[in-house]
Image (cartoon, helix red, strand yellow):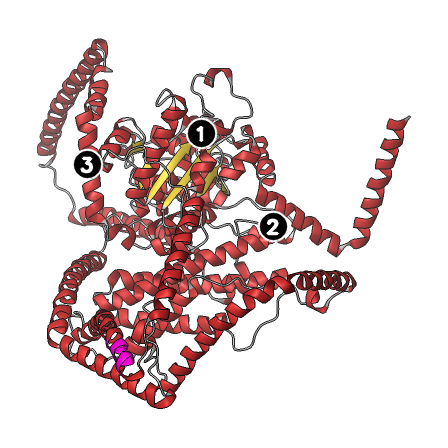
Amino acid sequence: MSHSSYGRMWAAAQGALENLLEDEYPTTQLRPQKDRHQVFQTLATFYLRYLKIFCSLEEVYDQIVHPQKRSVVRQVLQGVMGRLVELKNEMVELEYSEFHYFDDILQDFKMTPEDLEVPIPRYFVRERIRALKEREKMLTHILTSGGHQEHSTQATVQSMSVERAVWLLQVSERARQGRLRAHFMEKIRQEEQRLQRDSSSTDIVDPDLAATCIQKVWRGYRDRKRVNKERLEEMIFLGMIPAQHPTPSPAHLRAQQVKGRRHRVQEEHEAEYQKALVSIKESVQTVDGPDIKETLQEQIRQWFIECRDATGKFPDFPSAEDGGSASIFAQKTPEQVAAELAAKEEEREKKKKLKGEKDKKGNDRKEKKKEKKGKMKGKKGKGDPEEEEQGWKMTPSNFLPTVVEGAKLYKEVWHNREEKQNFLQRFDPQLVREEKRLEVEEELRVQVDELMRQELKNLKLVVDREKGKKKKKGKKSSKKKKKKGRKTGKKKKKKEKDLTADRSIESLYEELVLEGFIIRPMNVKLSDYIGEYSYLGTTLRQADIEPMPSLSDIRQLVALYGILPLGSQCVHERGPLIRSLLLAGPAGVGKKMLVHALCTETGANLFNLSPTALAGKYPGKSGLQYLLHMVFKVARQLQPSVIWIGDAEKTFYKKVPKLEKEMEPKRLKKVLPKVLKSIKPEDRVLLVGTTQRPFDADIKPFCKVYKKIILIPRPDYASRLTLWKELLHARGAQLGPKLDLSSLAKVTDGYTQGHIVQAIQTVLSSHRLNQQTKRPITAVEFIPPLALQDPVYKEEEEAFKAWYSRSPLGKKRARAARASEEEANPKKGKKKGGKIQKKGKDVKGKKKK
């Protein structure tokens, strides 16, 4: 795609964003909505519209070359990301569920379930690629110097015994001899066939019979080839067999090359732009600086004269806190400025007078307040009209102002800007000069303000004959106030002790790596977590059945709660603060894979604080405190960071098993809540716990630490079908008609992704893959390895559902469901209540007897 096509894409995204902002800021004030279904519809429409804009803006930012345009796109992109997270939070609070279904809205917007995937901005990793490579080098250097890699290689060599080595040599030698013998016998057979042909060549063959024989063979071969090709095309068209692309097309390769070239041009233009920012600012300071200084001084002197003509005396110069001389020329006349200054002085005098009167009127006000409260209580009991208007209202957003500002900047600067001459899309020096002129003006204004304050003092002494005695008193009082403020500040804030003040970050990082608390994340992307959209979610919800979430929903939640806040500082600071995340589900559903994907997509460090990693290290309370201090200090300095706790339920065991008592799995139980509170919005640090037995933990403290819980189920039929297709294709299997994937997906109901991967690895060895052409792979081959594994039974799935229903969000959803049932059928609720009361009375009576 060309520069102009990306420009058109940006213009279309900005147009859609303007329409969306009109709906976000309606002209008439909307009344609070009471219908929960209608509220969800509005939130879902906003969410999907922002998601579409987010996809197009991310593509534009990744490929656009102009450095000044990229800064505007990035501003809007971060605002849209944050707004998406806010809307998701609103939907969760409304429905008391982490999972939502938009089937009817998707149809209205002509979107597919694939469009619901949250795109992960590529600049999270690409703009930090050099730092990530340096960190990878440092990690490998520490591991090699510590002997970790050498130890692992030695272990693999020593694991083979002498008997095993002799057996392998014998097998390979016998195979070599067998191949030589087969080759020799093939040569003898070919020689015999040649002799037979020579002897039969003397017989005369009819040419017509020979021609018909050749025709038969050729036509049969041609028709068989054509039928097989047509059959394969039909199967691919019907979706029975996935389309096979062994090598990418030339157009696809060229598109990839163009994208890579664009990334290189981006870096060149950005470096050129950064140099120009410094050089142009210096030129503005040297060339335009004296003129700017003179004009500012003349403006302020003119203001002195105009104020004296209007009021009869020289005005007070605004302080640096009020904005200095910049507040004077904010499109106001000198009379207005003088009136404002006079009003401020009057307010100060009034405040002083009111201080004495407050003590006298204090008792009267308290009595009036009590009377008002009593009246309000009486009104509320009767049915206040204000209470009738109560309902849902959209909470104010922290990201909409940045989105509006970016949209305004696009409209004013870039919408109708002529760029025919700027074919290479380099920076615009005129815009840079305007920006730097404003910066230089602000810097010079501070210097000019100091000079003009002194000049105003001199004018007042000479012309008005005023003395500055009163001001000195004011200064003393202000100093006293400052001192008081300092004292109160010391009492409120308590600084934490730095236990590692004498050590560098590099030394702490090295220690944590060698102790096994910092590990290298696997190179896995979120898109590698294969799973399909749940097409029955809406119908099940309408039938009052809570569906199990799909794997597509899991990907969306990990992107919204983990990747976007960790990747963007703006989203983490202003959005809903998520300090911890829990991934709960049976073994083999991909919890660890999602943790590694979090680190890969954001370039985050991975800290391992699992009970197995902590066992026997840094003993005692002081040791644990020192370790956590080190971990969180390094995590903050090298953010973004993910702190992973595997088998998170062990930290909050109800009763520790005898075999695990030596490990001390509950060491972190008391410390974790305190440490989590210390994570501030500016710290891009996320605690992620993974558990396959959450019901073994004490639920109250467990849910206090992990407030966001994502329940990961076993894959459904659609997800299993795609899993079989993708994993077999990745392994190198040929997906022919004889391999019935639909039956495999049906048979593996109850099996997780881990079970399927293990079965494929055991069956598709290198020897079996080489035999595919002669003996195609069938579905029956995968049954024996699957039969050796235990699936996820219905009882285990029900246990996960029951545990999740006892979590805070599950309890809220149950209460909301009961309330809606009582509203729908008030008579049934009364009858049930009456029965319960009677039963209670009978029980009491029995107890008394």
- Do we see residue 736 in this rendering? no
Measure the alpha-carbon separation of dots 2 and 1: 40 Å
Q: Secondary structure at mark 3?
A: helix
Q: Which residues are magenta?
A: 455-462
Tell me whether the residue at label 2 lies in contact with that at label 1, contact meaning CB atoms closer than 8 angstroms. no
Q: Which mark identifies residue 668?
A: 1
Q: Amino acid at mark 3?
A: Met
Query: Relative to residue 346, is residue 103 depicted above or below?
Result: above
2 or 1: mark nearer the eye: 1
Alpha-carbon distance for marks 3 and 1?
Answer: 29 Å
> Which residue is rendered at x = 32% and y = 47% of the image?
601
Q: Nearer the viewer, residue 582 or 617?
A: 617
> Which secondary structure, mark 2?
helix
Per the image, the residue denoted by label 3 is: 138
Image location of residue 329, percent across then percent down:
32, 80
Look at label 1 and name its amino acid.
Leu
Mark 2 or mark 3, which is nearer the start of the sequence? Answer: 3
Image: 763 above or below 293: above
Name the disc covering residue 540, or none. Answer: 2
**What amino acid is labelled 2 in the image?**
Leu
